[in-house]
Amino acid sequence: MIINHTKEAFELQGKAREFAIKAHGDQLYGSKPYIHYLDMVSTTLHSMQDGGWDIPEEAFVAVWLYWVQEDADVGDDALWQEFGETITKAVITMHSPMQSIKDNKIAYVVKVAATLVNLQSSVIRGSNPHFSWYTKQLAKLMDK
């Protein structure tokens, strides 16, 4: 794994993870606590970096916050106060039209990582409708 993060960045990542745990509460991803899904997306993001992707440091924070607005009803102001403008804008953009996602590097890499995890999970569960959806989404993301 490429290690180029500062102590402050690691602390902010931990803060974002804890924020997500609290915000998602008892929510599940399949049969597991939702944080399991976010852990998988974070691991995938690190693997992408290991594979040569240029991953902005803020993406390692935004990855934990990907769904807190839609699933946990956390508002923009709460995110802004805790994590600042850049990360909040990326989180908002992750749920925008595809071109907006592609235009925001942080949102883009997190969306790719999340899509890869969802695709893998749908294959493992044998969920053909989800497999098709995530295959198409990944193709759209990769079509620059």
Image: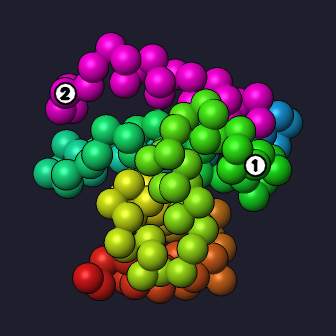
Residue sitting farthest toward the left:
52
Q: Is residue 43 visible?
A: no
* Position of residue 112 measured from the top left corner of the image (x, y, whole percent): 40, 63
* Position of residue 23 measured from the top left corner of the image (x, y, whole percent): 77, 36
Q: Tell me the crowding category of disc 2: few under 14, some 14 to 19, or many 20 or more residues within 10 angstroms, Cα based.
A: few
Q: Amino acid at mark 1?
A: Gly
**In the image, which is nearer the foreground, mark 2 or mark 1?**
1
- Per the image, the residue denoted by label 1 is 75
Helix, strand or loop at disc 2?
A: loop
Location of residue 107 by image quarter: bottom left
* Residue located 76% across and 29% down the image: 22
Q: Amino acid at mark 2?
A: Asn
- Per the image, the residue denoted by label 2 is 4
In the rendered structure, which segment of residues is drawn in magenta? 1-23
* Residue located 44% across and 71% down the image: 101
Q: Is residue 143 visible?
A: yes
Magenta residues, dominant SS class: helix
Q: Nearer the viewer, residue 6 or 49?
A: 6
Residue sitting farthest toward the top:
7
Whether residue 123 sits left or right of residue 7 in the image: it is: right
Work out which quarter of the rendered image holds the N terminus and state it: top left
Q: Is residue 81 above or below residue 29?
A: above
